[in-house]
Structures are given as structure tokens and as C-alpha cells.
Image (cartoon, rainbow, N blue to C red):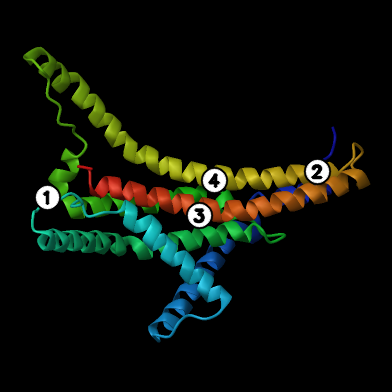
Amino acid sequence: MPTVSPIFADAMSHVLDQNWLGPVTKYQILVVVAAGLVGWAMISLAKRVATGEPVRGPLWNGLEALLLFIRDDVARPNIHSGHDHHEFHTDAEEHAHEAEVARHDQHYLADKFVPFLWTLFLFILTCNLLGMIPFLGSPTASISVTAVLAIVVFLVIQVSAVIKLGPFKYVKAFIPQLKGDNIIMSIFLLLVIVPLIAVIEFLGIFIRGAVLAIRLFANMFGGHVALAVIMAMAIGANGAFNIGGGVGAVLLGTALSVLELLVAFLQAFVFVLLTSIFLGMQLNPEH
């Protein structure tokens, strides 16, 4: 039976979780490291902003720009108050005032969730970037980590919806209001279509959570596995190092690492974007 080359085994150990300190695994330690880094970055930036002076330095300017982007281009456009449409008024000043009040209410509701989205984005991004460091790994390449993130998002969305809508309106949001053109069609809609759609809508809240967990895990895990496969190009049939394959592995590995850096930011952004969209959908079912 052919043995697994130590080089390939080392490459795969970068992808898979493993025990580091007794029963404590690598990803468990890295999750704590990521949380610590996010906490340090957020607290340090908050102290600088609290002074009232402009934030200086490429690190803090870049972090501030990322957070403002999440607030202005992700949270506020997708999490609204449900009062975006208003009747037309001939009085332009009154109409402008109502529009300003509606915009304030929309931003107020969205801004309540901005700290959660900021934390989520920075935590996922940090976990992703840890995989770029040799001998470490991305905790988000583990389905258990992404599943916990999805469960947290699920609870935040559903609890917030119950608080905002109330239990009765929350349950009613799953039941469509359909009317037929005649009695037979109305009975058919009431007995068949309405229950079917209600079940689909109810299952949809769990499916959306599963989508968040699986897509983040699949993208991060797939990228690291691809890098491990490329590293295997440097291994000959007899398990010895191959110079030609090694050169190709280095070139392709470098290109893939640059792509992985882009994916690290992209996947954190997509996770938060979908979270904000799902929040808006659940908080405002009438839209």
C-alpha cells in the first residue's frame, strides 16, 4: 500500500483541525485568538474616535473605512423600518419633513444591528486571514465553526423579529393572504396553496441559516484543499521532491494565495450582506 508523503500530509494538516494542547484543538485556539484581535481592534478604534480627532494611520483609516462601508452600504440599505413609502403631499416642505423622519427611522433601526454586523464581519475576516499564515489555518474552514455563526445569526434574526412584530404578527407573516376569483378557487387556495406556502416560508428561515454556514465553509475549505493539492505537485511518484513540479507548485501556490486573500474579504462581506438581507426580510415581512 502506498504511503502518504510527509509533504502532502503537512499541507493537509494546514487544512484540517487537530489537537494542539491535549483535547484543545487548533481551531478552538485560533477562534479565541480571532476574538481577541477583533476586541482589541474595536476597542482601540473606539478610543481614538471618542477623542473627536481624525483617525490617523493606514491601519485605523482602513478599519474605519471598512466599518463605514458595512454601515452605509450594507446595513442601512437592507435593514429598513418598513415605512419607506409615503403618500404624496402637495406641500413640498411637509413631504420633505416626512421623508427625513422616515430616513431617520430607517437608519435608527439599521444602526441598532450595526455593532453586531461589524463584529460578525471582523471576526469572520480575521478567521479567514489566519489561514494565510503558514502552519495555522482558517477556523471558518470547519463546518462546526460556520454552523455556530449561522445559529447565532438565526437567533438574532428571529428574536429581533418577534420583539419588533410581536408573536402574533410574527407567526402571521408566514401565512400568505390569498384570494380567489370564485368560491372554488378561494377554497383551493385556503386548503392547499396557503398551507403549502406557509410550510415553505417556515422552512425557509432554517434553509437560509444552513446556506450561510455551508457556503462559507465550502469556499474556505475548498480553497485550502486546492492549495494542498497544488503543493502535492512537488512530490514525485516515488514520494521524492520533484524540482519541476516544485517550481510549478510555488508559482501556482503564490497565485492561489493572492486569490485566497481576495476570497477572505469577499466571503466575510457576503456573509454579512446576506445576514443584513435576511434581517430586513424578517423584520419587514410586508416588503
Q: Amino acid at mark 2?
A: Ala
User: Closer to the observer: label 2 or label 1?
Assistant: 1
Label 4 belongs to which residue?
Answer: 217
Query: Quarter of the image containing the C terminus?
Result: top left
Residue drawn at (32%, 61%) of the image? 113
Residue 216 percent across, percent down from the top left: 52, 47
Residue 82 percent across, percent down from the top left: 20, 51
Asked whether, in this view, residue 37 is left or right of residue 8, the answer is left
* Marks 1 and 3, the one that precedes in the sequence: 1
135 or 62: nearer the viewer: 62
* Marks 1 and 4, the one that precedes in the sequence: 1
* Marks 4 and 2, the one that precedes in the sequence: 4
Q: Amino acid at mark 1?
A: Phe
Q: Secondary structure at mark 4?
A: helix
Q: Which mark is residue 232?
A: 2
User: Closer to the observer: label 4 or label 3?
Assistant: 3
Tell whether label 4 touches label 1 (CB within 8 Å): no
Residue 114 percent across, percent down from the top left: 35, 63
Q: Which mark is residue 88?
A: 1
